[in-house]
Image: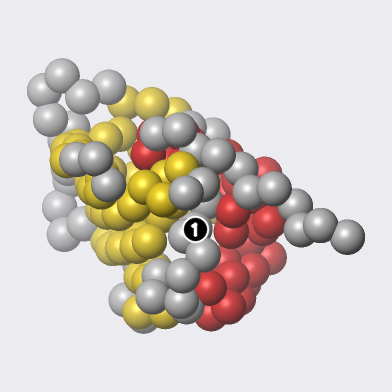
Amino acid sequence: MNPPTPLLFATPEDAEAAFYEAIAKGNMNALMAVWADDEDVTCIHPTGQQISGLAAIRESWRQVLSAARLKISASRMTRWQNVLLAVHQMVENLQMGDEVAGPLLATHVFIQGPHGWRMVCRHCSASAESVQPMPGSARRVLH
């Protein structure tokens, strides 16, 4: 039996959209498909705990997704990209049931490899103050 063919994310934006869609659907397999197949991947949730490695990241997201159905609206503040690396800085507002949290500041780091773009780092933390999108950045409700 052959392993499933990995999804090909042609752009970092494709990988990011798949990440948010997987969260909205509570789809753990789709969420983990966005991450690079590398044990050096890192995720920092708003709680501040650094989680390293695919197994630990999978478990942390399993706990998050089992606690509540999430809706995230996000706007991109800044973006840097070259041939192999992309960094996106986002402002997120999170809705868990009737509870709304935010704004949260998120940074996503993507690398390009043989299977397209994959996330290697997500760092999300609460903002100390209200954050306004930069002029010209579109606010997108992702889910």
* Mark 1 surroundings within 10 Å by alpha-carbon count, few (fewer than 14), some (14 through 19), many (20 or more): many
| Residue drawn at point x = 39 percent, y = 75 percent | 40
| Residue of label 1 | 35
**Whether residue 125 is situated above or below residue 48 in the rendered picture:** above
**Whether residue 11 is situated above or below residue 19 in the rendered picture:** above
Q: Position of residue 18 (x, y in %)?
A: 54, 40
| Residue drawn at point x = 51 percent, y = 47 percent | 115
Which quarter of the picture shows residue 141?
A: top left
Q: Position of residue 101 (x, y in %)?
A: 39, 53
Q: Position of residue 20 (x, y in %)?
A: 51, 43
Q: Is residue 51 visible?
A: no
| Secondary structure category for the residue under label 1 | loop
Q: Position of residue 107 (x, y in %)?
A: 27, 54
Q: Report the number of discs.
A: 1
Q: Quadrant of the N terminus?
A: bottom right
**Whether residue 140 is situated above or below residue 105 in the rendered picture:** above
Residue closer to the observer: 98 or 143: 143
| Residue drawn at point x = 38 percent, y = 61 percent | 120
Residue closer to the observer: 111 or 128: 111
Q: How is the image coloured?
A: secondary structure
Q: Is residue 38 visible?
A: yes
| Residue drawn at point x = 42 percent, y = 45 percent | 117
Residue closer to the observer: 105 or 41: 41
Which quarter of the picture shows residue 41?
A: bottom left
Q: Quadrant of the C terminus?
A: top right
Q: Residue furthest right?
A: 1
- Mark 1: amino acid: Trp
Residue closer to the observer: 79 or 141: 79
